Amino acid sequence: MNNLSTEEKISLVTGTGMWHTTAAGGLPSVILSDGPNGLRTQEEGTQANNDSIPATCFPTEATLACTWNPECLGKVAEAIADEAIEYDVSVVLGPGVNIKRSSFGGRNFEYLSEDPYLAGKLAAAYIKAMEGRGVGTSLKHFAGNSQERFRMTSNSEIDERTLREIYLRAFEIAVKEGKPGSVMASYNRLNGVYATENAKLLTEILRDDWGFEGAVVSDWGACTDLVSALKAGMDLEMPDSVGFHRKYLEEAVKDPQTFAALDRASSKVAALVEKYRPGAEGRTLKNVDSHAVAEEAALEGAVLLKNDGTLPITDPAVKIFLTGPLSVNVRIQGGGSSHVNAKHKPDMKATLEKCFVPADDAASADVILYFGGLDDKAEGEGFDRTSFSLPEEQIQDMENVLSLGKKAVFIVFGGSPFLIPFRERWDAILFMGLPGEAADTALSKLISGESSPSGKLAETWPFSYEDVPSYENFAREDRNIRYSEGIYVGYRHYDSSDIPVQYPFGYGLSYSEFRYSDLHIVSGGGKVSVQFKLKNAGAVDAAEIAEVYIRNPECDFPREKRSLRGFKKVFLSAGQEADVEIPLDDRSFQIYAHGAFAAVKGTYVIEVGSSLNDIRLSEEYSVEDGQIFTKDDFPQEAWKDFIYPAKGFFDKRSTVREMKASSPLIRLLLRIVKGQVGKIFPGREFDDPEVQMFWEGLMDGPIEAVAIQSDGLISRKLMTALIDDANGHHLKTIGDLLKGGKA
């Protein structure tokens, strides 16, 4: 990269437009496109998220995780890579591995699991498959990005042990095993420092500890200080900062340290472009049958939560009736930047009526299929959920259906847990999640018994939101978010505290039954593996997900009762038995203490089962060469809240929401923008999810990020005037604007 001029290096580290890198020094401009459950690529200048090229819509990550099948995620990634190559996309932005800290996370449908081991292993498989096709990935959102409220300015306060064991572990596995071409730095602050400027995160941990060799890309609009970000380890700011940052960087590179950072960053971006540019070696179409892959993923990700024998419906003469708010406009994906313009629009009624006899108003049906769950207004990017219950009208609708006394099956859609109404009264409950464009044919095969459900939950379904461990510290008014529950996230909390749940982590039924036997723990050469026999003892071909948990010895310091340390999905014909071996990794008996991971001495119990609450086999295992820790090794966390600037000290990182109370000019601007929403989003109401995402970004993004992405509506001068006005300098602001001087 020494043959590039300083100007060319500066050009490389900031994007062009919304989706392109900058062509410089003979390097082409390449496209980065949204993912990860399908390609969302747009023409430059397009404002609406949903206005993108038609592409295959696969199940979202929350549903893919329920497959517990790395091979399945690899197939999805390869299919997406095919379409990326077809449309000259170099990097697909995904997968997402942020831990599901709360059931209310608005973007949970885009993430894999509450468990870092499961999330990391699945993400690694996705990354390896896509990278193997010559298409880059961007592992996101790094790190501590667990909520949508104040997502661009909030401060995630996470103690070092919790950070390493829970919130970074999935990233670590994915980086080391998957080797993504890029990692996306998140919007939020982490322990007081923006992720894009966090040298500990981007350099010390990501590069020095984990050996990451790719490029670090900012989330879109997350970089508000390019000089600081480059010095911390970020390489590419996206999108184009329309000149806002360039002059500062041009001045700063006179400093040798900054120039060295620019040199490194531009080299990383150049390598990214060279490796993934259209025509690069290894980028060849395989013409994968993408829709078939989408159907396979939907089948494997569906979770049978309850069944009294009503499913499968094997008699084609059975009359069925479809009802519920999602029976016609079935929800197949989430909203926001991951929304795919699906090539296929599923038709549940037409598809199911090819297999069964349709009943005429519900009274004449043998079986009623009720389609319900979370809609686009309940969960989506840019906002968090506000209720753990379904809408009252949907609950009343269910009551009416169940009062008919017919066999009734609840077909559940959504990307997050909620309280299932009348759980005991349904004859069967089938969770489809957000199943992608092949939802109709996948459901038909599951209902008819052509395929047996084989998915299991990748997150716990609690009984109430008050049971969620982060309940007191999630999406509140204070932007300092204390992760005070520590390592007790998801099942680690419910299991360790013996809190009853609707459905436990790893839970899922089948049309068959499975028997486990002959457990052996094999150790040697520093490696440990779990061996056992698994038999399909039922009458139908089916798959079972065998899960390995390690129950920890009792101790006087915080440690979960047990944790997932291995899993394997095994497909077996009726009556077939197989030998299964699941290796344990070196973290299985370790915790993070005093700046390093270390094994803890003691007697553990290795458990094998069908879910967290359905253990079939167990055996003790002693760790003799570990360390002994006490509660004194883990002192009480001393939280250090970030002090957000108030009036008189507002700056370019302050938000419209913060400043509007003291700025008449900002309030006027908001009235003007709100009046233009109808023109920006024709035919949309203000509570539309995409409109909400736009509005929350406007209100809660740093004012400079809002200005950069305003398509020229907010100039640097106007931005400065708005800040001055909010700081109480009204006369100065008005004078500068009137005379056209530099504000």
Image: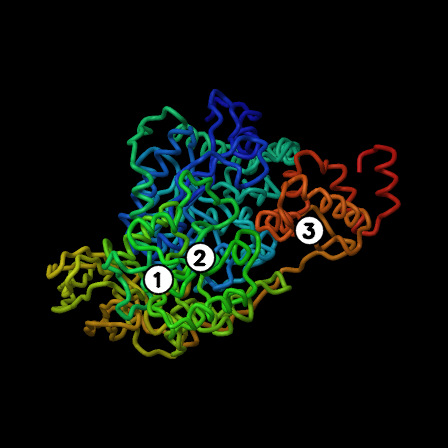
Q: Residue at x 55, y 38 (%)?
A: 237
Residue indicated by mark 1: 430
**Reading the chain from its start, which is encountered first: label 1 or label 3?**
1
Q: Is residue 621 above or below residue 314?
A: below
Secondary structure type for disc 1: strand
Q: Position of residue 671 (x, y in %)?
A: 76, 48
Going by the image, does 376 lie left or right of 271?
right
Please, what is the three-letter code of the amino acid marked with disc 2? Answer: Gly
Q: Dot 2: within a 10 Å radius of its alpha carbon, few (fewer than 14), some, or many (20 or more) residues?
A: many
Q: Residue at x 31, y 41 (%)?
A: 129
Q: Dot 1: within a 10 Å radius of its alpha carbon, few (fewer than 14), some, or many (20 or more) residues?
A: many
Most foreground residue, 333 or 641: 333
Going by the image, does 272 lie left or right of 588?
right
Mark 2 touching mark 1, by CB under 8 A?
no
Please, what is the three-letter code of the amino acid marked with disc 3? Answer: Thr
- Which image quadrant is residue 223 in? top right
Please, what is the three-letter code of the amino acid marked with disc 1? Answer: Leu
Does residue 454 appear in this view? yes
Q: Position of residue 711 (x, y in %)?
A: 66, 34
Most foreground residue, 507 or 645: 507
